[in-house]
Image: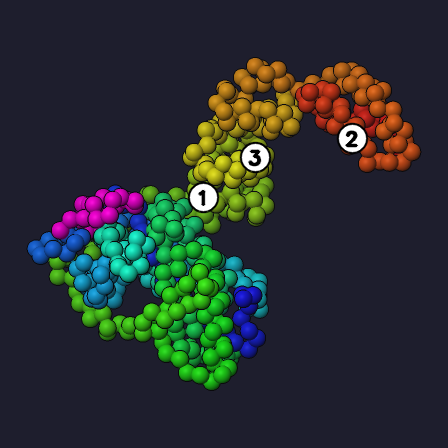
C-alpha cells in the first residue's frame, strides 16, 4: 500500500493512547511496578481483586497526570471521580477496571504536529485536540506463546498505573496518526513520566478510523484497531483499513462497527468482536474510592517538576546557538540528549560546534554500539574541552575525531592529557609544513606532472600525502595554503 488516501475520499482518524506511568508502585496497591519479573510474582489481594481488599490511590500517578495536563495545554478538573468499567476477560481478575468517569482529570488539550501534504491543502502544522486524559489501571497480560492451544495469564501488569489519552478525530491519514503518536511518545518520555517502551507495552495505541466521501460532514462507519505497539504498525494497519473501507464503499457493501486486530505477519486486520457501546460496560461510581480533589499543593508540585517544554526549548536553543530547525529537532530527541548538548555548549563556548559533535561523532558512536547516552562513558565537560582544543588549533579536527575521541571514550584521561601523552599537538610552524610539501612533491613527480598538465583532481592526493607525512598533526588550512602557493595553477 502506498499510504495515500484515494482521491474523492477522506479518512477520519482518532487515537486512544495508553501510557504506563513510571511510578514505583501500582495504581491502587503497594506492589512494585516493574517489567520483566517472574509471572504472577508481583500481585496482592488488592490488584487481584480479592474480597475485602480496598484500593488506595497512588499520589505519584496523579502528579504525573497533572504534568502531562499542563504540557498539552489542558484544563485541569479540580474534582473528578473513579468508576468501575465492567467487562469479562481472563486477564482482568476483578471483572472490572477502575477508570475515571464522565469527568476526566484533564480535558480539552492539544498538540501541534506536521500535516500530511498528501491530504492537506496547506503545509502548516495541524492542531490535534485531546479530548481527555484520565487515570486508570492496566489489566494483566494473556499469552499463547508457550502453547497455542492454551492461554497463560500473567497478572503482574494488573493494576499498573495508566494514562488514557483520547484524541479527537482530527487526523486525516496514517502518516498524521503516526506523527501524532510520535509526538506524544516524545512528550511523555521527555517529561520522565513513562519509558515509552512500545515493545514492552508501556505505550499502546487503539486507532479509530472511518472513511467518508470528500464534502460529507457525517462520519462513516467506525472501526477500532486494537493494541498497535509500533509506529510502523499504526501506519500499516490504518493504510490497510482505509483502503478496505474505500473498497467496500465503492462496491456499495454495508459493514458494521467493530473491533479489529492487526496481524503483522500477513499485513491485514481481522475481526475480533463487535464494537462495544458505552452502555455495554455498565459503569458505575467506584464505591471504595473518594472523589479525586486536586488541591493547590498537588498543582504546585506538578508545575515545579515540569522541565522546560520541548516547543519552548526548541525556540530558545535555535536563537541562542544559531541552530537550524532540523538540528534543534534532532538535539531534542530526548531530554537527556538535549541536556548533554547544552552542558557541552557551555563547556566549549560554541553551541554550533557542540551540535555538530552531538549529531556527528556522538550519535554515530551510539548507533554503532547500540547504546543510549547514559551507557556512554563520556562527560560533557570533556567533550567541550575536546571541541575547544580544535577551535583553538591545539589539535586538528582529524586528530580529534580519529585519535582523541576514541581515547576519551576508552577512559584514557581528559582531552588535554591524551593530547600530551600521545604527542598529538597540532603542527602550526609554516617552515615545517613547507618542508613536508617539498618532500611529498619530490617523491611524486609523475602525479605532479599530471596535475600541472590539468588533472586537478590530484590536488586532494597531495593534501592526503602531506597529512600522512605529518602523521595527521599538521594544520590542514596551512597545508592547503602552501600547496596553493607551491603548485600554482594547472
Residue range corresponding to the magenta coloring: 27-45
Q: Position of residue 435 (x, y in %)?
A: 80, 16
Q: Is residue 233 left or right of residue 394?
A: left
Q: Position of residue 263 (x, y in %)?
A: 41, 63
Mark toward the start of the polypeptide (3 vs 1): 1
User: Is residue 376 located in the magenta-colored stretch of the structure?
Assistant: no
- Who's the residue at 76% across and 23% down the image? 466
SS state under label 1: loop
Q: Position of residue 268 (x, y in %)?
A: 45, 67
Main SS category, magenta section: loop
Query: Would residue 409 be visible to someone looking at this image?
Result: yes
Q: Position of residue 285 (x, y in %)?
A: 17, 65
Of the two numbered discs 2 and 3 in the rendering, the one whose residue sits closer to the viewer: 2
- Who's the residue at 81% across and 32% down the image? 459
Q: Is residue 225 left or right of residue 419?
A: left
Which residue is most to the left?
52
Q: Report, in whole angstroms, how far the alpha carbon at label 3 lies from the one at label 1.
A: 17 Å
Quadrant in the rendering for residue 221:
bottom left
Q: Which residue is mark 2?
A: 461
User: Is residue 42 located in the magenta-colored stretch of the structure?
Assistant: yes
Q: Which residue is mark 3?
A: 361
Q: Which residue is mark 1?
A: 334
Q: Report, in whole angstroms, how far the alpha carbon at label 2 lies from the one at label 3.
A: 25 Å
Of the 4 image quadrants, the one containing the C terminus is top right
Amino acid at each position: 500500500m502506498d499510504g495515500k488516501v484515494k482521491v474523492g475520499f477522506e479518512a477520519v482518524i482518532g487515537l486512544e493512547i495508553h501510557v504506563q506511568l513510571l511510578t514505583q508502585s501500582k495504581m491502587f496497591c503497594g506492589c512494585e511496578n516493574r517489567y520483566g519479573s517472574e509471572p504472577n510474582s508481583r500481585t496482592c489481594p488488592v490488584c487481584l481483586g480479592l474480597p475485602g481488599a480496598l484500593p488506595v490511590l497512588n499520589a505519584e500517578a496523579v502528579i504525573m497526570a497533572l504534568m502531562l495536563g499542563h504540557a498539552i495545554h489542558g484544563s485541569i478538573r479540580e474534582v473528578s471521580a473513579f468508576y468501575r468499567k465492567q467487562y469479562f476477560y481472563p486477564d482482568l481478575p476483578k471483572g472490572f477496571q477502575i477508570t475515571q468517569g464522565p469527568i476526566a482529570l484533564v480535558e480539552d488539550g492539544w498538540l501541534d504536529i506536521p500535516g500530511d501534504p498528501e491530504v492537506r491543502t496547506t503545509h502548516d502544522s495541524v492542531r490535534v485536540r485531546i479530548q481527555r486524559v484520565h487515570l486508570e489501571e492496566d489489566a494483566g497480560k494473556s499469552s499463547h506463546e508457550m502453547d497455542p492451544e492454551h492461554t497463560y495469564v500473567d497478572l503482574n501488569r494488573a493494576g499498573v498505573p495508566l494514562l488514557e489519552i483520547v484524541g479527537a478525530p482530527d487526523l486525516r491519514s496514517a502518516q498524521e496518526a503516526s506523527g501524532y503518536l510520535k509526538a506524544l511518545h516524545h512528550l511523555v518520555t521527555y517529561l520522565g513520566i513513562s519509558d515509552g517502551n512500545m515493545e514492552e507495552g508501556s505505550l499502546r495505541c487503539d486507532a479509530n478510523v472511518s472513511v467518508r466521501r470528500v464534502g460529507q460532514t457525517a462520519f462513516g462507519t467506525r472501526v477500532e484497531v486494537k493494541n498497535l505497539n509500533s509506529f510502523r504498525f499504526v501506519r500499516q494497519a490504518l493504510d490497510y483499513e482505509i483502503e478496505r473501507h474505500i473498497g467496500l464503499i465503492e462496491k456499495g457493501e454495508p459493514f458494521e462497527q467493530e473491533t479489529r486486530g492487526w496481524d503483522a505477519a500477513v499485513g491485514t486486520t481481522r475481526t475480533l468482536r463487535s464494537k462495544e457501546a458505552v452502555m455495554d460496560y455498565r459503569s458505575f461510581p467506584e464505591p471504595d474510592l473518594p472523589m479525586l480533589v486536586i488541591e493547590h499543593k498537588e498543582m504546585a508540585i506538578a508545575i515545579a517538576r515540569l522541565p522546560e517544554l520541548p516547543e519552548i526549548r526548541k525556540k530558545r536553543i535555535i536563537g541562542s546557538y544559531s541552530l537550524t530547525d532540523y538540528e534543534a529537532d534532532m538535539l531534542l530527541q530526548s531530554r537527556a540528549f538535549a541536556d548533554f548538548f547544552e552542558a557541552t555548549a557551555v563547556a566549549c563556548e560554541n553551541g554550533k560546534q557542540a551540535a555538530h559533535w552531538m549529531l556527528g561523532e556522538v550519535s554515530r558512536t551510539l548507533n554503532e554500539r547500540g547504546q543510549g547516552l547514559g551507557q556512554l562513558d563520556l562527560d560533557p565537560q570533556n567533550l567541550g574541552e575536546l571541541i575547544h582544543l580544535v577551535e583553538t588549533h591545539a589539535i586538528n579536527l582529524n586528530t580529534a575525531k580519529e585519535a582523541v575521541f576514541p581515547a576519551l571514550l576508552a577512559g584514557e584521561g581528559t582531552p588535554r592529557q591524551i593530547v600530551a601523552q600521545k604527542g598529538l599537538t597540532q603542527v602550526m610552524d609554516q617552515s615545517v609544513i613547507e618542508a613536508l610539501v617539498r618532500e611529498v612533491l619530490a617523491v611524486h613527480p609523475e602525479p605532479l606532472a599530471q596535475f600541472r598538465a590539468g588533472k586537478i583532481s590530484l590536488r586532494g592526493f597531495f593534501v592526503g600525502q602531506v597529512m600522512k607525512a605529518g602523521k595527521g598533526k599538521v594544520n590542514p588550512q596551512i597545508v592547503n595554503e602552501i600547496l596553493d602557493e607551491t603548485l600554482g595553477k594547472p
